[in-house]
Image (tube, rainbow, N blue to C red):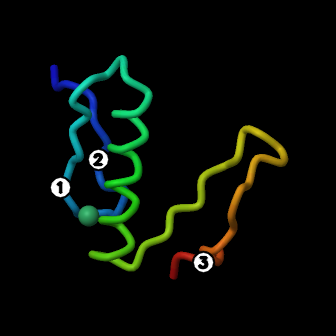
């Protein structure tokens, strides 16, 4: 079984961003952020995640991109 991490969500991409410390929220956030940055820079892919918190949106810069 593999240790957790953040696999790239782009179809066909095998890249995974490991989280060094699963118990560390900072490490989790860093891993998630690194993956998102990779997705954008490598694939121009902006993942739209369903927001669990209704109004928690400190910044909204990425426009919703319909996946063609
Ligand atoms: Zn990727």
Question: In percent of the image, x 36 and y 44: which residue is there?
Answer: 30
Which residue position holds label 3? 66
Q: Secondary structure at mark 3?
A: loop
Q: Position of residue 49 (x, y in %)?
A: 60, 53
Whichever of labels 3 and 1 marks the residue nearer the N terminus, that label is 1
Q: CA distance from mark 2 to mark 1?
A: 7 Å
Whichever of labels 3 and 2 marks the residue nearer the N terminus, that label is 2
Q: CA distance from mark 3 to mark 1?
A: 22 Å
Image marks 2 and 1: residues in contact by CB distance under 8 Å: yes
Question: In percent of the image, x 34 and y 63: which residue is there?
Answer: 10
Whichever of labels 2 and 1 marks the residue nearer the N terminus, that label is 2
Alpha-carbon neighbours of circle 3 within 10 Å: few (<14), some, or many (≥20)?
few
Q: Nearer the viewer, residue 25 or 43?
A: 25
Alpha-carbon neighbours of circle 2 within 10 Å: few (<14), some, or many (≥20)?
some
- The reply to whether the residue tagged 1 has its Cβ within 8 angstroms of ligand 1 is yes
Which residue position holds label 2? 7
């Amino acid at each position: 079984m593999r240790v957790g991490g953040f696999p790239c969500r782009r179809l066909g991409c095998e890249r995974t961003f490991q989280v060094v410390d699963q118990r560390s929220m900072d490490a989790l956030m860093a891993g998630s952020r690194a993956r998102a940055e990779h997705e954008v820079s490598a694939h121009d892919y902006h993942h739209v995640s369903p927001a669990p918190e209704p109004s928690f949106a400190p910044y909204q810069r990425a426009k919703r991109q319909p996946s063609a």
